[in-house]
Image: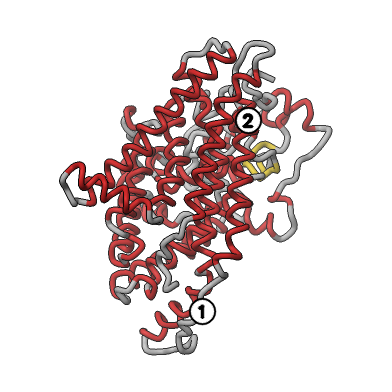
Amino acid sequence: MNRAGAPPSTGERAATSSRSAPFDLLRVPVIGPLLSRRGSRRFAQVALGLGALALVLHGLFGPSIAPKNLATLVTWVHYRGVLVVALLVLGNVFCFGCPFLLPREVARRFTRPVRHLPRPLRSKWVAAVLFAGVLYAYEVFDLWGAPAGTALLIVGYFALALVVDASFRGAPFCKYLCPIGQFNFLASTLSPLEIAARDPDACATCKTKECIRGERDENGAPKPGGQRGCELALFVPQKVGNLDCTFCLDCVHACPKDNVGLLARMPGEELVHAGRRSGIGQVLRRPDWAALAIVFTFGALLNAFGMVAPVYALERWLADVLGTQRESILLALIFLAVLVVLPAMLFGAAAAASRGLGGAPERLREQATRHAFGLVPLGLGVWVAHYAFHFLTGIWTIVPVLQNAVAELGAPLLGEPNWRLGGIEAGLVWPIEVGFLALGALGSLAITYRLVDARRGRRVAAYAPWAVLVLALAATAGWLLAQPMEMRGTFL
C-alpha cells in the first residue's frame, strides 16, 4: 500500500480474485438480465426523454406559477432528491439512462465525426466552470420559480450535447463538459458498485481488447453495426472506480468473454488511489480534478446558503459597499468568494500547517490537490441532506400537479387536483438531514487521514489541520441546514 493508502493494484486484485467473488449486480436474477439487455439503456433513455419533453412542454405552455408546473417542481425538487439517493446507493444510474444523448445517436446514423475535441478543452477545468455556472444561473435567474426558463435550460442541454458529440468523436460532452455528469462522477465515488472485471486473469490474456476498441472485423476496422467499446477511454483492466464512468455498459456488451460486471466495492476507496488509472492518469495529482471536487463541495454549501436569510443580509451589505443593486454582480462576487477565494485560503492554510507539523516533503499545491478529494464525502453529505429536505417536505406535491397537468388536456383522468397534499413535516426531516451530514463528515475525516503524507511518527499532527478544516465545514453546513430555508418549488 502506498503512502496515500491506495487500494491493491490490478495484479494484487488478480491474485485474490480466486479466493472471493464480489457481489455482481448483473448476476442477480431478474435485475441483472434486465440491466444487461442491449436495449435496456435505450429504453431508459427514451423513457427519460419523453419525460424531459413533457417538462419542456409544460414549462413553456403550462401554468406560470412554479409550484403548479412540472418543469420546476420535477426538475428542482423531485428529480434532484431521487438523483442524490440513487447515486449514493447504486452509482451513476442517471448517466445510464441519460436522455441528452438521444439526438446525437440519431445524428451519428448519418455522420461519423472524426475530429477530437481540442486539447485545451480535454480537462475538467471547463467542466468545473460550467458546474459553477449552472449553480450561478439557478440563483441569478431564479430558475426554481421560472418554468419557461427551466424548460429552455433543458432544451439548451439537449442542443449542447448534440452539437458537441455530433462534431467530435467519442463522448466529449459526457467526459469533459456536462455539469450533471461531473456531479454524478464525484458522487458515485461513494457508491458501493463499480464497473470492473470479474476475473482480472481473463483480461490479462485478452488480445483483442473489445471493451475499449469495440467489435472489429478481421482487418481490425470497426465492424459495421458492431458493438462499440468505451467512448470515455476507460480500459476495464486498468480502470479504477467510477470517475468518468457513465455506466453505459458498452464494455459489458463488447467483452467476448462476458468478464465485465457491476461489482461491489468499498465506497470511497477510489478517492485514495494514488496510482494511474485508465483514461484519467494519477487523479490525485491533477489540479483540474481537484478544482472540480472543490466546486462540488463548496458548491453544496453555497447552494444551501442561497436559500437562507443570511445571504440577503450579505447582499444588502455588498450593495451598500459597492453602490449597486444589480443582483447579478452581487451574486457573482459571492460565488467568486465562496468557490475560489475561500477554498484557496483554507486549503493554503491547512496545507502549510500540515507540512509544518508533519514534515511532509510535498509542496503546498500538491498537498492541496490531493486533499481536495477528501472533502467529496462531506460535499455529498451536504447535497443529500439539502435535497432530502426539499424532496421529503414536498414529496406528495407532484400528485396534484400531475392531476392538474392531465386535466389541462381536457380529460381529468387522474381526478381533481388535491392541492392540500404536501410532504413530511420539516421537524421530522431534520434528523435525516443531520444523519446524512454526519455520515459525510465521518467519511471525509477517514479519507483525509488516509491522504495525509507525513514523516514517520508525525502523521496525526499532519492530519490535525485537515481534520479541523473538515469539522469547520461540517459545522458550517449544520448551521446552514438549521436555518429556516426557502421552500422553493412547492406551496409550503
- 122 shown above or below 82: above
Q: CA distance from mark 2 to mark 1?
A: 50 Å
Q: Earlier in the sequence, mark 2 or mark 1?
A: 2
**Residue 312 visible, this angle:** yes
Residue type at numbered disc 1:
Leu
Q: Nearer the viewer, residue 261 or 295?
A: 295
Q: Which residue is mark 1?
A: 421
Circle 1 SS class:
loop
* In the displayed structure image, the side of residue 39 where residue 333 appears, left or right: left
- 357 shown above or below 29: above
Residue type at numbered disc 2:
Pro
- 205 shown above or below 165: above
The image quadrant of residue 65 is bottom left
Image coordinates for residue 138, horizontal then vertical, percent: 34, 54
The image quadrant of residue 365 is top left
Task: Quarter of the image for the C terminus: give it.
Answer: bottom left
Q: Which residue is mark 2?
A: 237
Determine crowd level at label 1: few under 14, some 14-19, many 20+ residues with C-alpha closer than 10 A: some
* In the displayed structure image, the side of residue 121 where residue 469 appears, left or right: right
Looking at the image, which residue is at 67% across and 24% down?
9
Image coordinates for residue 103, horizontal then vertical, percent: 37, 55
Looking at the image, which residue is at 44% across and 57% down?
99
- 101 shown above or below 235: below
Q: Nearer the viewer, residue 50 or 4?
A: 4
State which mark lies toward you, 2 or 1.
1
Image coordinates for residue 186, horizontal then vertical, percent: 52, 40
Determine crowd level at label 2: few under 14, some 14-19, many 20+ residues with C-alpha closer than 10 A: many
* In the displayed structure image, the side of residue 332 where residue 169 appears, left or right: right
The image quadrant of residue 426 is bottom right
